[in-house]
Image: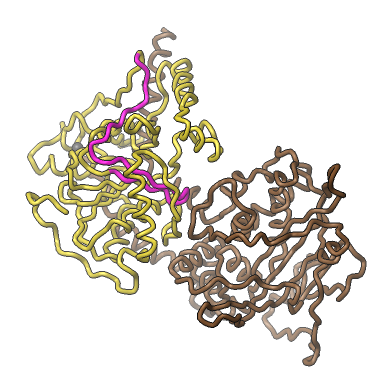
Chain colours: A brown, B yellow
Amino acid sequence: MYVAVKGGEQAIDNAHKLLAKKRRGDTTVAELGVEQIRQQLPLAVARVMTEGSLYDEELAALAIKQAAGDLVEAIFLLRAYRTTLPRFSASLPIDTSSMQLNRRLSATFKDVPGGQLLGPTFDYTHRLLDFTLLAEGEYPGPQGKPDATVEACPRVLGLLAKEGLIKEEADTGAPVADITREPLEYPASRAERLQALARGDEGFLLALGYSTQRGYGRNHPFAGEIRVGGVEVWIEPEELGFPIAIGAIEVTECEMVNQFVGSATELPQFTRGYGLAFGHAERKAMGMALVDRSLRAGEYAEEIISPAQQEEFVLAHCDNVEASGFVSHLKLPHYVDFQAEVELIRKLRKPSKEQAQ
Amino acid sequence: MNAATQPRPQSRPQRDEAYNFAYLDEQTKRMIRRGLLKAVAIPGYQVPFGGREMPLPYGWGTGGMQLTAAILGAEDVLKVIDQGADDTTNAVSIRRFFARTAGVATTERTPEATIIQTRHRIPETPLQADQIMVYQVPIPEPLRFIEPSETETRTMHALNDYGVMHVKLYEDIATFGHIATAYAYPVTVDERYVMDPSPIPKFDNPKLDMSPALMLFGAGREKRLYAVPPYTRVTSLDFEDHPFEVQKWEHNCAICGSQDSFLDELILDDQGTQSFVCSDTDYCAQRVNEGREGQ
Ligand SMILES: [Zn+2]
């Protein structure tokens, strides 16, 4: 005699214990410290902070540890924590022109005021496994000059704008919605779109951006400027009436110069796409900038025919916490609905059986 | 809120004071309650709300959980079911979540519960006027599989333009001889909005019509909520010559012998021997307590 499935609670407890064991691995190997993750996996930390929408390196590193290295799971952990935090204030816009640069490049000009700064990058490394890393040992890196300073330098696209060659981005002064507090409705404002893209999955944006390069909504991009470095965050508390700096964060900013537009009444101008991510996250910032520009198709009266140009398609599917939750819910029992379908298909098959006889 | 005639259930568990009552902050709960009031005022209309990220994955009941959190009081008695059963793992997980964060009493008995959060079923035991059903909804838009664009479907609802839905159902009849929808079968609420009753089997649809209980629906990922107030007309879409009908089984429940409950099919051995048992485990257990049994 079948007895209805019982034991769910015990099964859940056991599963959690097994997960903890799997995460820890062989206990004869030293446990990974959160600070080690923070220091030695900074690019993973950057991605988790960006898509988790929370700038906190320690908590992002903790989430990576807890998630056993599953970054989408770590992003989810950070998001679930973030949602419980009180909002004290909205910061003033960060000023990336005054960024303390670690890296800066422009693919549009051979030389730009302030110069190009390669900085720490995988670019130009030969992707050969470095077996010396198998042996644990100190690698001190290059000696920096302790008194060296990098001057803040103007953004490349600002130089183009001076000449009127690129569309100015004007702040309309309209209030900026917070998509983590208010539901996204379509059509979304550009500010809402950029928020959604900033939280969006790096792989999804990369693929969509790539699709525009391959002709699905082509918009002729040039990497106008990519810059990585520290910026100060300022807030202006109402009771003070003047702004104060509350700290500095590292960000990656990408400005794409795109296909020009013009009309009988307007001289042709380049357009742009914008990407911004926490920490050092160039792939994300570039993918975001490509998709931001392709979502502006309507604004520039371009034909909307490709996935990357379709706002609802992109914004409704770019969030990996949502996507991963909904895909993984297929693991939940569906036997009631399946039974309903089985019953239906048996019923639908009956007449065809009779016909066969 | 519980019916005076019902026995009080077991004592309440200890609440984890590290979290606000029922996890969500009070402002968020107020925001959700405002949405619920609107939803009750416009039966079947999908109200957008500022859905929060819950510590459970999207698609695993975050919409239902947010609604439950918003309406839960310290005196409430909560029942959580998934596939009709209280002991399915996700139901266990959600029930534990509220026992921990709200310290509310929980029950498996349908008549004892003041709030029943559910995924995919409506209990077989008739609901009462002082009960609230909270449904977990994956895709709140009944037109979504016909029209993927939210902009378009909102317009269709606004214009009461449901022609495409009838065309789809008609095409089913033309192709299969029957309407080929077995669950999440669309309904018209209060003769106005077409609504997705959540992925309950169509067997459960008639239980929505003129129910004395308040029905609340929450879709966390899609950030929509909607409601069917008590004693509201809920009709399943059909045609005069193809009237709506619910599933029937040629078997009885192997445990309690019930002839009119929704049955789960079990495969017992490698030869595919089937057995059928009630999906609603509380209903089934109560019938066994009353001395009924299967064949
Ligand atoms: Zn039974």
Which quadrant of the figure has residue A216? top right
Q: Which quadrant, please, contains the C terminus of chain A?
A: top left
Magenta stretch contains residue B290: no
Please say if B207 is above or below A102.
above
Residue A266 percent across, percent down from the top left: 84, 48
Q: Which of A7 and B192 is in front in this view?
A: B192
x, y percent for residue B194 = 40, 32
**Who's the residue at 40% across and 54% down the image?**
B62
> Does B226 appear in magenta?
yes
Residue A56 versus residue A347 in the image, above or below: below
Q: Position of residue B122 (x, y in %)?
A: 27, 40
Above or below for A82 versus B277 = below
Q: Is residue B11 left or right of residue A78?
A: left
The residue at the point 25 percent across, 34 percent down is B207
| Residue extent of the magenta highlight | B215-240
Q: Image check: B51 left or right of A311?
A: left
Please state the horizontal and vertical placement of residue A292, each as a whole percent of the image: 69, 53
